[in-house]
Amino acid sequence: MPTTFELSRRDLLELSGAALVATTGGVMGATPAMADSQAFSKTREAARKAAHAQLVENDAPAASFALFDRNGLIWADAVGVIDKQAKTPATTDTLFCIGSCSKVIAAAATMVLVDRGKVELDAPLTRYLPNFRMLSDGYADITVRMLMSHASGFPGTDYRGGFAAKWNPRYPAQVMETLRAARLKHRPGEMSVYCNDGFTMLEPLIKQVSGKDFPAFVESEIFAPLGMRRSRFGNRAIAPGSFAPGYAKQRKQPLEAINPSASGGAYTTPSEMARFLAMFLNEGKFNGRQVLSAGAVKRMGENQSAREPLRPAPSENGFGLGWDSVRADAFAPFGLTAWRKNGGTATYATDMIVIPQAGLGVIVTGSSIKFNAGRLAEQVLLTALVEQGALPAMPQPLTSLAQPVAAAATADPRWFDGVFAHHASLIRFEKEEAGTVSLAKYASGKWTTALKDLKPREDGALAAEESPTTVFALTEAQGATYLLQKGVTGLKHYAATMVGAQKLPPLGELSPAWRRRMGKTWLIVNEPAESLLFVAQQPIVALSEAPGAQGYVVMASGAPDARQAQAVAASKGDRRARMGLKLPLNNGRDRNDLEVFERDGQEWLRIGSTALRPLDGVAGLGAGAHVCAIGPEGYAEWRRLDMIGALSVSGCANWKLFNDEYQQLAGGAGDVRHVAAPQAAYLWVDGKPGARISVALA
């Protein structure tokens, strides 16, 4: 393991300041706008100060950001370090992964083919991929447009091996295989639900139509014409020292390879992305090159969600093609139409905004998920608009969204007659003695109060006196009850309404077979050894039944402090519990059926493409020699270590050691001798199908 290096607050401030001298002067592909060091100088200085503060506040290693106009880059800056031990500063040539901001690149690549008449937006996906299949018949109605507007109906994201330390070119094929065994979450085009797999499916489509792999097509048709020489995906090597790594407990982490390239895998710099984004300010043209038609740019910025029948909270804002927002709430109060996209991975946080009316845009990225790229992006662009004279002054934060307390102080009965759910949690509202209302969340097998003293308001909403900028409301759509949450966000000068959760329809009792599974834990067996899941969270899933959510099974996964709980309907069958919510936008994402199957006389689980074995079927190892046989599927084997001792493993491809909370302690590739094994630990080993792995504990 590398030597740890503790960076003090003072060191961080000094290093951040030193990094600021490496700004626009050395950036590749400089445009004339960069020569004027005084352009938007007040905005630049404010951005530096805000970025410094964020690095310290969030213990983030590095960040980079750029302001641009129709001509390209105005200025760019980099702050922080890419090596804490060597104190190597980040520069504007440092590569960052922009995560889901890659979706705008993927959408633009697809629109290149639309411009050339090789792809039709409203043609079915099966026209281009005739072998594409799903369990639900409606898959044939999925169009190319729906892939780019999150309206396909796919379950969400095939996370297996998606975030790893090694690029896997077969990942798109894995996703297609996973979808073949999956049901649709909703009717194609019925609603928009954030969906990574929709963009991943653009990769085989582009390859089929163009004859080039997705990364190669983007490089030749977008990166090269725009002069984005450093930008790349996982197919091209990224040398140490050229990118900003993440840190965990002051240890530098390996390069994060995002295998869904079209959905989140681009590595680039803000100064190069400024060239790409300036194209959207200039009707598809940059430096005299018409990369996209003006019509393609216009269609990408249209509200695709407006055409969908299920919209519990209608808005002029919505998904574009690739864009998260086509009338971003942060700028709408000033009459400005802004297109916005954010992106996050296990390591990086990015936000980018363009305002065609103002001819300005910004991109911000940081090498920590704690770095608030969105807040900094808003601040940079609003400050620039003030400096430009487009706005008179920076906006003031909102102090309250709640209406006055209702005189009768009686809450609508609909708050209390069921449980609400979204993709990662269950919520219920409870009456308090004083006539107020509390909000509880289900976690670790019990309901825990999260908010108290919510009071009914004159409009029927709920809000607490000490937090009047967070308001809960109810609405009905297509016979379902939805929980809406309105709150201030970003720089706190605007409010956004989110479709927070859907009330679970009542179901019958769980069958005896399902009830026997409650309270049990399963271990993941087919996650690739290089997956970052083993570092980021526990490789387990636990099943339970939440009081009040009769007939539903709750699947809990993840680290103890961020465990996700997803409810699936299990009252109509003993082998498959079904995702059943129709929840638009972000809170309905990444939902899967839960399937039970038999293997070796035990009940195993399948969630999406992830296979899991029961914990209570894992054999224990005492002192002496043992053999672990890898089955025909190539699933990894788990063993419980029943004694403290020295562990040796031979004949495996990879091994990992976990503590009794399923957190990884150690691991590596190939054989290992005399590793200290603590009591109540678990061993994970993998190898080729049929491999016999020798394990000794002494």
Image: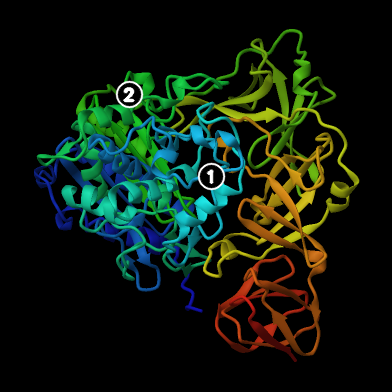
Residue underneath mark 2 = 337
The residue carrying pointer 1 sits among few (fewer than 14), some (14 to 19) or many (20 or more) residues within 10 Å by Cα, namely some
Q: Quadrant of the C terminus?
A: bottom right
Residue 2 at x, y percent in the picture: 47, 78
Q: Where is residue 507 in the image (x, y as percent from the top left)?
A: 82, 31
- Element class at badge 1: loop
Q: Does 81 sit above or below residue 583? A: below
| Disc 1 + disc 2, Cβ < 8 Å | no
Q: Which residue is drawn at 43% across and 30% down?
A: 319
Residue 326 appears in which quarter of the rendering? top left
Give the spatial CA distance, label 1 vs label 2. Answer: 38 Å
Residue at screen point 17% across, 35% down: 70
Q: Mark 1 points at which residue?
A: 133
Whether residue 372 is visible to the viewer of this picture, yes or no, is no
Vertical arrangement, residue 531 with respect to residue 488, above or below: below
Give the residue type at disc 1: Arg
Would residue 340 be found to the left or right of residue 617 on screen? left
